[in-house]
Protein backbone atom coordinates (compact mmCIF):
# COMPACT_ATOMS: atom_id res chain seq x y z
CA UNK A 1 0.00 0.00 0.00
CA UNK A 2 1.20 3.51 -0.72
CA UNK A 3 -0.30 6.95 -0.38
CA UNK A 4 1.78 9.18 -2.60
CA UNK A 5 1.44 12.93 -2.68
CA UNK A 6 2.58 14.68 -5.84
CA UNK A 7 3.38 18.37 -5.42
CA UNK A 8 4.56 21.06 -7.80
CA UNK A 9 7.93 22.21 -6.43
CA UNK A 10 7.77 25.88 -7.31
CA UNK A 11 5.24 27.86 -9.38
CA UNK A 12 3.40 25.05 -11.15
CA UNK A 13 3.50 23.82 -14.74
CA UNK A 14 6.18 21.29 -13.87
CA UNK A 15 4.57 18.50 -15.84
CA UNK A 16 2.57 17.03 -12.96
CA UNK A 17 -0.14 15.64 -15.26
CA UNK A 18 2.30 13.45 -17.12
CA UNK A 19 3.95 12.09 -13.97
CA UNK A 20 0.58 11.50 -12.25
CA UNK A 21 -0.64 9.64 -15.30
CA UNK A 22 2.55 7.54 -15.20
CA UNK A 23 2.23 6.81 -11.48
CA UNK A 24 -1.50 6.14 -11.87
CA UNK A 25 -0.72 2.87 -13.64
CA UNK A 26 0.08 1.42 -10.20
CA UNK A 27 -2.65 3.36 -8.38
CA UNK A 28 -6.24 2.50 -7.67
CA UNK A 29 -7.33 6.01 -6.75
CA UNK A 30 -6.24 9.52 -7.80
CA UNK A 31 -7.50 12.53 -5.82
CA UNK A 32 -7.42 16.23 -6.72
CA UNK A 33 -7.60 18.14 -3.44
CA UNK A 34 -7.31 21.89 -4.13
CA UNK A 35 -7.54 24.55 -6.82
CA UNK A 36 -9.98 24.37 -9.68
CA UNK A 37 -9.93 24.79 -13.43
CA UNK A 38 -7.06 27.27 -13.09
CA UNK A 39 -4.91 24.13 -13.41
CA UNK A 40 -3.81 22.72 -16.72
CA UNK A 41 -2.43 19.18 -16.70
CA UNK A 42 -1.41 17.68 -20.01
CA UNK A 43 -1.30 13.96 -20.68
CA UNK A 44 -0.18 12.30 -23.90
CA UNK A 45 -1.40 8.75 -24.56
CA UNK A 46 -0.58 7.12 -27.91
CA UNK A 47 0.14 10.54 -29.44
CA UNK A 48 -3.28 11.77 -28.28
CA UNK A 49 -3.07 14.86 -26.10
CA UNK A 50 -5.49 15.51 -23.24
CA UNK A 51 -5.43 18.95 -21.58
CA UNK A 52 -7.15 18.47 -18.22
CA UNK A 53 -8.25 21.32 -15.98
CA UNK A 54 -10.51 19.95 -13.25
CA UNK A 55 -10.23 16.29 -14.02
CA UNK A 56 -7.73 14.19 -12.04
CA UNK A 57 -4.98 12.85 -14.28
CA UNK A 58 -5.90 9.20 -13.64
CA UNK A 59 -9.13 9.65 -15.60
CA UNK A 60 -7.71 8.13 -18.81
CA UNK A 61 -7.00 4.84 -16.98
CA UNK A 62 -10.40 3.10 -16.69
CA UNK A 63 -9.33 0.85 -13.79
CA UNK A 64 -8.40 3.84 -11.64
CA UNK A 65 -10.96 5.69 -9.50
CA UNK A 66 -10.70 9.49 -9.71
CA UNK A 67 -11.93 11.96 -7.12
CA UNK A 68 -12.40 15.71 -7.39
CA UNK A 69 -12.03 16.28 -3.67
CA UNK A 70 -13.58 18.39 -0.94
CA UNK A 71 -11.03 21.21 -1.17
CA UNK A 72 -11.47 21.81 -4.90
CA UNK A 73 -13.58 24.68 -6.20
CA UNK A 74 -15.68 23.48 -9.12
CA UNK A 75 -17.13 25.45 -12.00
CA UNK A 76 -19.97 23.09 -13.01
CA UNK A 77 -20.33 24.54 -16.49
CA UNK A 78 -16.66 24.13 -17.24
CA UNK A 79 -16.64 20.65 -15.67
CA UNK A 80 -19.55 19.58 -17.85
CA UNK A 81 -17.66 20.70 -20.95
CA UNK A 82 -14.53 18.87 -19.84
CA UNK A 83 -16.41 15.61 -19.23
CA UNK A 84 -18.22 16.02 -22.53
CA UNK A 85 -14.95 16.58 -24.38
CA UNK A 86 -13.31 13.56 -22.77
CA UNK A 87 -16.30 11.41 -23.66
CA UNK A 88 -16.03 12.55 -27.27
CA UNK A 89 -12.41 11.31 -27.15
CA UNK A 90 -13.46 7.87 -25.91
CA UNK A 91 -12.76 8.43 -22.19
CA UNK A 92 -16.04 7.38 -20.58
CA UNK A 93 -15.50 9.07 -17.16
CA UNK A 94 -17.42 6.32 -15.33
CA UNK A 95 -14.47 6.30 -12.92
CA UNK A 96 -15.12 9.90 -11.76
CA UNK A 97 -16.47 10.91 -8.33
CA UNK A 98 -17.08 14.50 -7.26
CA UNK A 99 -17.11 15.60 -3.63
CA UNK A 100 -20.44 16.85 -2.30
CA UNK A 101 -18.45 19.16 0.03
CA UNK A 102 -16.63 21.01 -2.76
CA UNK A 103 -17.62 24.65 -3.36
CA UNK A 104 -19.24 25.73 -6.60
CA UNK A 105 -17.55 28.41 -8.71
CA UNK A 106 -20.44 30.61 -9.83
CA UNK A 107 -20.49 32.89 -12.90
CA UNK A 108 -20.24 35.93 -10.60
CA UNK A 109 -16.96 34.62 -9.14
CA UNK A 110 -15.48 34.80 -12.62
CA UNK A 111 -16.70 38.39 -13.07
CA UNK A 112 -15.42 39.43 -9.64
CA UNK A 113 -12.03 37.85 -10.43
CA UNK A 114 -11.83 39.95 -13.60
CA UNK A 115 -12.92 43.20 -11.97
CA UNK A 116 -10.77 42.84 -8.88
CA UNK A 117 -7.75 42.23 -11.12
CA UNK A 118 -8.60 45.38 -13.11
CA UNK A 119 -8.87 47.36 -9.88
CA UNK A 120 -5.38 46.28 -8.82
CA UNK A 121 -4.03 48.29 -11.78
CA UNK A 122 -0.23 47.94 -11.83
CA UNK A 123 -0.31 45.49 -8.88
CA UNK A 124 -2.20 42.79 -10.77
CA UNK A 125 -1.66 39.22 -9.55
CA UNK A 126 -2.11 37.84 -13.04
CA UNK A 127 -4.84 35.36 -12.06
CA UNK A 128 -6.16 32.84 -14.56
CA UNK A 129 -9.54 34.60 -14.45
CA UNK A 130 -11.41 31.43 -13.50
CA UNK A 131 -13.02 32.83 -10.34
CA UNK A 132 -10.83 30.76 -8.01
CA UNK A 133 -9.94 33.48 -5.47
CA UNK A 134 -13.49 34.90 -5.16
CA UNK A 135 -14.93 31.39 -4.69
CA UNK A 136 -12.46 30.53 -1.92
CA UNK A 137 -13.23 33.94 -0.36
CA UNK A 138 -16.91 33.01 -0.19
CA UNK A 139 -16.04 29.60 1.25
CA UNK A 140 -13.94 31.08 4.04
CA UNK A 141 -16.61 33.73 4.59
CA UNK A 142 -19.15 30.85 4.83
CA UNK A 143 -21.38 31.94 1.98
CA UNK A 144 -20.33 29.49 -0.75
CA UNK A 145 -22.70 27.06 -2.38
CA UNK A 146 -21.39 23.55 -1.76
CA UNK A 147 -22.10 20.77 -4.24
CA UNK A 148 -24.43 19.06 -1.79
CA UNK A 149 -26.55 22.23 -1.59
CA UNK A 150 -26.24 22.96 -5.31
CA UNK A 151 -27.91 19.60 -5.96
CA UNK A 152 -31.22 20.70 -4.47
CA UNK A 153 -31.09 24.49 -4.67
CA UNK A 154 -34.37 25.91 -5.97
CA UNK A 155 -34.53 28.21 -8.98
CA UNK A 156 -35.88 30.95 -6.71
CA UNK A 157 -32.92 30.67 -4.30
CA UNK A 158 -30.49 30.67 -7.19
CA UNK A 159 -32.13 33.80 -8.61
CA UNK A 160 -31.97 35.54 -5.21
CA UNK A 161 -28.26 34.74 -4.82
CA UNK A 162 -27.49 35.96 -8.34
CA UNK A 163 -29.46 39.18 -7.74
CA UNK A 164 -27.59 39.85 -4.49
CA UNK A 165 -24.24 39.31 -6.16
CA UNK A 166 -25.23 41.53 -9.06
CA UNK A 167 -25.97 44.31 -6.56
CA UNK A 168 -22.53 43.76 -5.05
CA UNK A 169 -20.94 43.93 -8.52
CA UNK A 170 -22.88 47.11 -9.35
CA UNK A 171 -21.80 48.77 -6.09
CA UNK A 172 -18.16 47.80 -6.34
CA UNK A 173 -17.42 47.66 -10.04
CA UNK A 174 -20.25 49.61 -11.67
CA UNK A 175 -21.21 46.74 -13.93
CA UNK A 176 -24.58 45.03 -14.41
CA UNK A 177 -23.17 41.65 -13.44
CA UNK A 178 -24.27 38.31 -14.85
CA UNK A 179 -27.31 37.85 -17.07
CA UNK A 180 -29.54 36.12 -14.55
CA UNK A 181 -31.87 34.02 -16.69
CA UNK A 182 -29.17 32.57 -18.91
CA UNK A 183 -26.93 31.94 -15.87
CA UNK A 184 -29.74 29.98 -14.18
CA UNK A 185 -30.35 27.96 -17.32
CA UNK A 186 -26.67 27.13 -17.77
CA UNK A 187 -26.18 26.23 -14.10
CA UNK A 188 -29.23 23.95 -13.95
CA UNK A 189 -28.24 22.31 -17.19
CA UNK A 190 -24.74 21.65 -15.86
CA UNK A 191 -26.17 20.36 -12.56
CA UNK A 192 -28.29 17.85 -14.43
CA UNK A 193 -25.22 16.70 -16.35
CA UNK A 194 -22.88 16.25 -13.37
CA UNK A 195 -25.27 15.22 -10.58
CA UNK A 196 -24.68 11.49 -11.07
CA UNK A 197 -21.00 11.93 -10.21
CA UNK A 198 -21.56 13.80 -6.94
CA UNK A 199 -21.18 11.80 -3.76
CA UNK A 200 -19.59 11.76 -0.30
CA UNK A 201 -16.05 11.09 -1.50
CA UNK A 202 -14.69 10.87 2.07
CA UNK A 203 -16.39 7.46 2.25
CA UNK A 204 -14.58 6.24 -0.88
CA UNK A 205 -11.23 7.54 0.36
CA UNK A 206 -11.72 5.82 3.71
CA UNK A 207 -12.60 2.53 2.01
CA UNK A 208 -9.52 2.63 -0.22
CA UNK A 209 -7.27 3.41 2.75
CA UNK A 210 -8.79 0.61 4.87
CA UNK A 211 -8.35 -1.82 1.98
CA UNK A 212 -4.70 -0.71 1.78
CA UNK A 213 -4.97 0.33 -1.85
CA UNK A 214 -2.49 2.55 -3.67
CA UNK A 215 -3.63 6.16 -3.60
CA UNK A 216 -2.22 9.23 -5.35
CA UNK A 217 -2.93 12.81 -4.31
CA UNK A 218 -2.54 15.12 -7.28
CA UNK A 219 -1.46 18.65 -6.52
CA UNK A 220 -2.36 21.50 -8.83
CA UNK A 221 -0.32 24.73 -9.17
CA UNK A 222 2.89 24.73 -7.10
CA UNK A 223 4.19 25.16 -3.57
CA UNK A 224 5.34 28.74 -4.05
CA UNK A 225 1.80 29.66 -5.10
CA UNK A 226 0.52 28.49 -1.69
CA UNK A 227 -1.58 31.21 -0.04
CA UNK A 228 0.49 30.99 3.17
CA UNK A 229 3.93 29.79 2.07
CA UNK A 230 4.11 31.25 -1.43
CA UNK A 231 5.19 34.65 -2.70
CA UNK A 232 2.15 36.37 -1.18
CA UNK A 233 0.11 38.13 -2.56
CA UNK A 234 1.26 36.72 -5.92
CA UNK A 235 -0.18 33.33 -5.12
CA UNK A 236 -3.29 31.28 -5.68
CA UNK A 237 -5.98 31.04 -2.98
CA UNK A 238 -5.48 27.42 -1.91
CA UNK A 239 -2.79 25.21 -0.33
CA UNK A 240 -0.91 23.34 -3.05
CA UNK A 241 1.46 21.74 -0.52
CA UNK A 242 1.41 18.24 0.96
CA UNK A 243 -0.42 19.34 4.14
CA UNK A 244 -3.08 21.05 2.04
CA UNK A 245 -3.93 17.80 0.30
CA UNK A 246 -4.85 16.18 3.61
CA UNK A 247 -7.30 19.01 4.25
CA UNK A 248 -8.79 18.97 0.75
CA UNK A 249 -8.61 15.27 0.01
CA UNK A 250 -9.82 13.72 3.28
CA UNK A 251 -6.58 11.78 3.62
CA UNK A 252 -5.21 11.86 7.18
CA UNK A 253 -1.55 12.99 7.44
CA UNK A 254 -0.41 9.72 8.99
CA UNK A 255 -1.57 7.80 5.91
CA UNK A 256 0.96 9.49 3.62
CA UNK A 257 3.91 7.30 2.63
CA UNK A 258 5.71 9.39 -0.03
CA UNK A 259 5.91 13.03 -1.06
CA UNK A 260 7.09 13.37 -4.64
CA UNK A 261 8.09 16.83 -5.85
CA UNK A 262 7.77 17.46 -9.56
CA UNK A 263 10.65 19.66 -10.60
CA UNK A 264 11.24 21.16 -14.00
CA UNK A 265 14.87 21.08 -15.25
CA UNK A 266 14.58 24.90 -15.45
CA UNK A 267 12.10 27.20 -13.74
CA UNK A 268 8.98 28.91 -15.05
CA UNK A 269 6.34 31.19 -13.63
CA UNK A 270 3.13 32.65 -15.03
CA UNK A 271 1.58 35.77 -13.61
CA UNK A 272 3.30 38.41 -11.54
CA UNK A 273 5.58 38.09 -8.53
CA UNK A 274 9.25 37.78 -7.63
CA UNK A 275 11.42 35.32 -9.52
CA UNK A 276 15.07 35.57 -8.49
CA UNK A 277 16.55 33.39 -11.26
CA UNK A 278 14.44 34.85 -14.08
CA UNK A 279 16.24 35.41 -17.40
CA UNK A 280 15.05 37.33 -20.41
CA UNK A 281 17.86 36.64 -22.86
CA UNK A 282 18.18 34.40 -25.92
CA UNK A 283 18.42 31.30 -23.68
CA UNK A 284 15.02 32.18 -22.15
CA UNK A 285 13.58 32.54 -25.64
CA UNK A 286 15.13 29.22 -26.69
CA UNK A 287 13.76 27.38 -23.66
CA UNK A 288 10.28 28.94 -24.04
CA UNK A 289 10.01 27.73 -27.61
CA UNK A 290 11.70 24.33 -27.10
CA UNK A 291 9.58 23.63 -24.01
CA UNK A 292 6.41 25.18 -25.45
CA UNK A 293 6.22 27.30 -22.33
CA UNK A 294 2.81 28.82 -22.88
CA UNK A 295 -0.03 28.38 -20.34
CA UNK A 296 -2.32 25.35 -20.87
CA UNK A 297 -5.22 27.30 -19.36
CA UNK A 298 -4.56 30.87 -20.52
CA UNK A 299 -2.05 30.55 -23.38
CA UNK A 300 0.16 33.19 -21.71
CA UNK A 301 3.93 32.97 -22.36
CA UNK A 302 5.60 31.71 -19.19
CA UNK A 303 8.49 33.54 -17.58
CA UNK A 304 11.72 31.51 -17.70
CA UNK A 305 14.63 31.12 -15.29
CA UNK A 306 17.37 28.82 -14.08
CA UNK A 307 17.12 26.17 -11.38
CA UNK A 308 16.72 27.86 -7.98
CA UNK A 309 18.00 25.61 -5.19
CA UNK A 310 17.19 28.18 -2.46
CA UNK A 311 13.50 28.18 -3.43
CA UNK A 312 13.56 24.43 -4.03
CA UNK A 313 15.03 23.59 -0.64
CA UNK A 314 12.38 25.78 1.00
CA UNK A 315 9.71 23.84 -0.89
CA UNK A 316 11.31 20.52 0.09
CA UNK A 317 11.19 21.54 3.76
CA UNK A 318 7.55 22.68 3.83
CA UNK A 319 6.38 19.62 1.90
CA UNK A 320 8.54 16.93 3.52
CA UNK A 321 9.67 15.81 0.06
CA UNK A 322 10.97 12.23 -0.08
CA UNK A 323 11.73 12.01 -3.81
CA UNK A 324 12.04 14.20 -6.91
CA UNK A 325 10.68 13.62 -10.43
CA UNK A 326 12.71 15.81 -12.80
CA UNK A 327 10.82 16.81 -15.93
CA UNK A 328 11.61 18.44 -19.29
CA UNK A 329 15.31 17.62 -19.09
CA UNK A 330 15.35 17.15 -22.88
CA UNK A 331 14.46 20.85 -23.34
CA UNK A 332 17.88 21.95 -22.06
CA UNK A 333 19.63 20.28 -25.00
CA UNK A 334 22.04 22.75 -26.57
CA UNK A 335 22.30 25.14 -23.61
CA UNK A 336 26.09 25.53 -23.41
CA UNK A 337 26.43 26.06 -19.64
CA UNK A 338 23.56 25.30 -17.29
CA UNK A 339 23.40 27.64 -14.32
CA UNK A 340 22.15 26.53 -10.90
CA UNK A 341 21.40 29.11 -8.22
CA UNK A 342 22.83 27.80 -4.95
CA UNK A 343 22.41 30.89 -2.73
CA UNK A 344 21.14 34.47 -2.82
CA UNK A 345 23.03 37.65 -2.18
CA UNK A 346 20.88 40.02 -0.11
CA UNK A 347 22.30 43.46 0.72
CA UNK A 348 25.87 42.16 0.52
CA UNK A 349 25.19 39.01 2.59
CA UNK A 350 24.91 35.45 1.32
CA UNK A 351 21.66 33.79 2.40
CA UNK A 352 20.35 30.26 1.95
CA UNK A 353 16.77 30.75 3.19
CA UNK A 354 13.83 31.94 1.11
CA UNK A 355 12.74 35.37 2.43
CA UNK A 356 9.08 35.96 3.34
CA UNK A 357 9.40 39.64 2.43
CA UNK A 358 8.75 40.44 -1.22
CA UNK A 359 10.84 43.58 -0.86
CA UNK A 360 13.78 41.44 0.23
CA UNK A 361 13.13 38.90 -2.51
CA UNK A 362 13.21 41.66 -5.08
CA UNK A 363 16.65 42.72 -3.81
CA UNK A 364 18.02 39.15 -3.87
CA UNK A 365 20.57 38.35 -6.55
CA UNK A 366 21.23 34.76 -7.58
CA UNK A 367 24.63 33.23 -6.87
CA UNK A 368 25.26 30.65 -9.56
CA UNK A 369 27.27 27.51 -10.07
CA UNK A 370 27.60 26.20 -13.60
CA UNK A 371 27.60 22.71 -15.02
CA UNK A 372 28.43 21.74 -18.60
CA UNK A 373 25.39 21.46 -20.84
CA UNK A 374 24.63 18.58 -23.20
CA UNK A 375 24.02 18.46 -26.93
CA UNK A 376 22.37 15.08 -27.34
CA UNK A 377 18.69 14.60 -28.10
CA UNK A 378 17.38 12.85 -24.99
CA UNK A 379 13.86 12.16 -26.23
CA UNK A 380 14.69 8.62 -27.42
CA UNK A 381 16.52 7.59 -24.26
CA UNK A 382 14.69 4.77 -22.51
CA UNK A 383 16.87 4.11 -19.48
CA UNK A 384 18.57 6.48 -17.03
CA UNK A 385 22.02 4.99 -17.51
CA UNK A 386 21.86 5.83 -21.23
CA UNK A 387 21.61 9.57 -20.58
CA UNK A 388 24.75 11.46 -21.58
CA UNK A 389 27.32 12.04 -18.84
CA UNK A 390 26.61 15.77 -18.67
CA UNK A 391 22.86 15.23 -18.39
CA UNK A 392 23.47 12.78 -15.53
CA UNK A 393 25.86 15.20 -13.86
CA UNK A 394 23.14 17.86 -13.84
CA UNK A 395 20.69 15.43 -12.22
CA UNK A 396 23.25 14.37 -9.65
CA UNK A 397 24.15 17.98 -8.87
CA UNK A 398 20.50 18.63 -7.98
CA UNK A 399 20.58 15.62 -5.66
CA UNK A 400 23.78 16.83 -4.04
CA UNK A 401 22.37 20.32 -3.43
CA UNK A 402 19.02 19.14 -2.05
CA UNK A 403 19.84 15.85 -0.36
CA UNK A 404 16.82 14.31 -2.11
CA UNK A 405 17.04 11.50 -4.65
CA UNK A 406 15.81 12.08 -8.18
CA UNK A 407 13.86 8.85 -8.79
CA UNK A 408 12.22 9.74 -12.10
CA UNK A 409 13.56 11.70 -15.08
CA UNK A 410 11.21 12.71 -17.87
CA UNK A 411 12.61 13.34 -21.36
CA UNK A 412 9.42 14.01 -23.33
CA UNK A 413 5.64 14.17 -23.00
CA UNK A 414 4.90 10.49 -23.77
CA UNK A 415 4.49 7.73 -21.20
CA UNK A 416 7.47 5.85 -22.65
CA UNK A 417 9.72 8.90 -22.16
CA UNK A 418 9.80 8.37 -18.39
CA UNK A 419 13.03 7.01 -16.92
CA UNK A 420 12.72 5.36 -13.54
CA UNK A 421 16.04 5.06 -11.75
CA UNK A 422 16.93 1.78 -10.10
CA UNK A 423 17.20 2.07 -6.32
P1 LIG B 1 -5.57 32.11 -9.70
O1 LIG B 1 -5.24 30.75 -9.16
O2 LIG B 1 -6.29 32.09 -11.01
O3 LIG B 1 -6.22 32.99 -8.67
O4 LIG B 1 -4.17 32.84 -10.03
C1 LIG B 1 -3.24 33.21 -9.00
C2 LIG B 1 -1.81 32.98 -9.46
O5 LIG B 1 -1.57 31.57 -9.57
C3 LIG B 1 -1.47 33.59 -10.82
O6 LIG B 1 -0.13 34.01 -10.80
C4 LIG B 1 -1.62 32.41 -11.77
O7 LIG B 1 -0.83 32.57 -12.92
C5 LIG B 1 -1.10 31.29 -10.89
N1 LIG B 1 -1.64 29.98 -11.27
C6 LIG B 1 -2.89 29.52 -11.05
N2 LIG B 1 -3.02 28.25 -11.53
C7 LIG B 1 -1.83 27.92 -12.04
C8 LIG B 1 -1.34 26.72 -12.65
O8 LIG B 1 -2.02 25.71 -12.79
N3 LIG B 1 -0.04 26.76 -13.05
C9 LIG B 1 0.75 27.84 -12.85
N4 LIG B 1 0.34 28.96 -12.28
C10 LIG B 1 -0.94 29.00 -11.88
Image (cartoon, grey):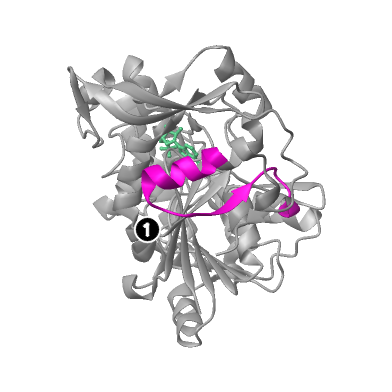
94 sits to left or right of 223: right
Q: Residue 213 location, x and y as percent?
A: 54, 80
207 sits to left or right of 315: right
Q: Residue 240 location, x and y as percent?
A: 39, 50
Q: Is residue 55 magenta?
A: no
Magenta highlight range: 393-416
Question: Would you place residue 321 above or below residue 39 in this image?
Answer: below
Q: Which residue is mark 1?
A: 242
Task: Report the image quarter containing ligand 1.
Answer: top left
Q: Residue 339 location, x and y as percent?
A: 47, 26
The answer to whether residue 134 is seen in the rendering is: no
Residue at 60%, 75% in the rendered image: 28
Residue reaching furthest to the front:
389
Question: Would you place residue 22 above or below residue 214 in this image?
Answer: above
The quadrant of the rendering that contains the C terminus is bottom right
Residue at 50%, 66% in the rendered image: 151
Residue reaching furthest to the bottom:
211
Q: Is residue 409 magenta?
A: yes
Specify few, some or many for label 1: CA neighbours under 10 Å numbering under 14, 14-19, or 20 or more: many
Residue placed most toward the observer, 313 or 249:
313
Amino acid sequence: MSVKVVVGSLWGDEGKGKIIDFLAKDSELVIRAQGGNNAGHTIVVNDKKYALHLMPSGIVRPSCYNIIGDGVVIDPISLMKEIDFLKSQGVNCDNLFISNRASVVMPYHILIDKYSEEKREENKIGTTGKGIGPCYMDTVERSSIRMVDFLDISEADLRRILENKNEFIKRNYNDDGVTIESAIEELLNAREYIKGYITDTTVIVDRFLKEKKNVLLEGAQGSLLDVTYGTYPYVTSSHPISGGFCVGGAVPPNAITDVIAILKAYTTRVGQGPFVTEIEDSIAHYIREAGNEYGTTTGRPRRIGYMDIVALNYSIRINGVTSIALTLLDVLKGVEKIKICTAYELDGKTIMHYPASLKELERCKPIYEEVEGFHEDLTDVTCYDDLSDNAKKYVEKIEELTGVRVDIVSVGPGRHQTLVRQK
